[in-house]
Amino acid sequence: MASNSPTFRITPARTADHIEAAKVLFKSYAEWLGIDLTFQGFASELQSLPGQYAAPQGELLLAYSAEDVPIGCVAVRPLKKSSSAERQDLSDDGKHCEMKRLELRLDTLPWMAGAIQLYKRVGFVEIAPYYETPLEGTLFLGLDLARSTDPT
């Protein structure tokens, strides 16, 4: 009988080994893309990891195989307040209010058809560019989590 347990685990990057694994994965992805990422400050981003992805504002997550080999990563950072969906939450006593941004944004390239198909299948839609890029045809996608989790 087949096991339903995942064949990987997700771990927040908290140690020097985690950060080094993330750097290797970032570099591998950049090489696979075959695109000069200088315009994004890629080299300085690698040097400063976790940088803008550091908790508690952001998060750098690593996926490890069952054999404990790093196989993927996700880097999440806050958006500028003016460019994100927000939800207002009141505490039980009604005295405290917290704004939460509830939107995921990403960019991808037109030749990544499998990724685009996956993103759209889970609810991402095309949005206006949220940064300038010299890469022609870049697709910008967003997922409004406030809307996608609203039970109404």
Image (tube, grey):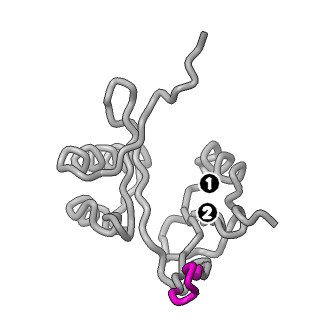
Tell me the quarter of the picture where residue 11 sits: top left
Q: Residue furthest bottom?
A: 95
Question: What secondary structure is marked by label 1?
Answer: loop
Residue 150 visible in the snapshot: yes
Q: Which residues are magenta?
A: 89-96
Q: Position of residue 37 (x, y in %)?
A: 37, 61
Q: Name the quarter where the N terminus is drawn.
A: top right
Question: What secondary structure is marked by label 2?
Answer: strand
Task: Determine contact: label 2, label 1, CB under 8 Å.
Answer: yes
Q: CA distance from mark 2 to mark 1?
A: 7 Å
Q: Residue furthest left?
A: 16
Question: Which is more N-terminal, label 1 or label 2?
Answer: 1
Residue 139, disc: 2
Which residue occupies 72% across, 68% down? 147
Instruction: From the image, tell me which residue sits under label 1.
Output: 110
Q: Residue furthest front?
A: 93
Closer-to-camera residue (82/108): 82
Which residue occupies 42% across, 67% down? 77
Q: Name the quarter where the C terminus is drawn.
A: bottom right
Q: Position of residue 29 (x, y in %)?
A: 39, 46
Magenta segment's dominant SS is loop
Check the image and report above or below for 42 versus 127.
Answer: above
Which residue occupies 27% across, 50% down? 23
Closer-to-camera residue (93/16): 93
Amino acid type at circle 2 is: Leu
Tell me the quarter of the picture where residue 4 sits: top right
> In the drawing, does residue 144 fall left or right of residue 52?
right
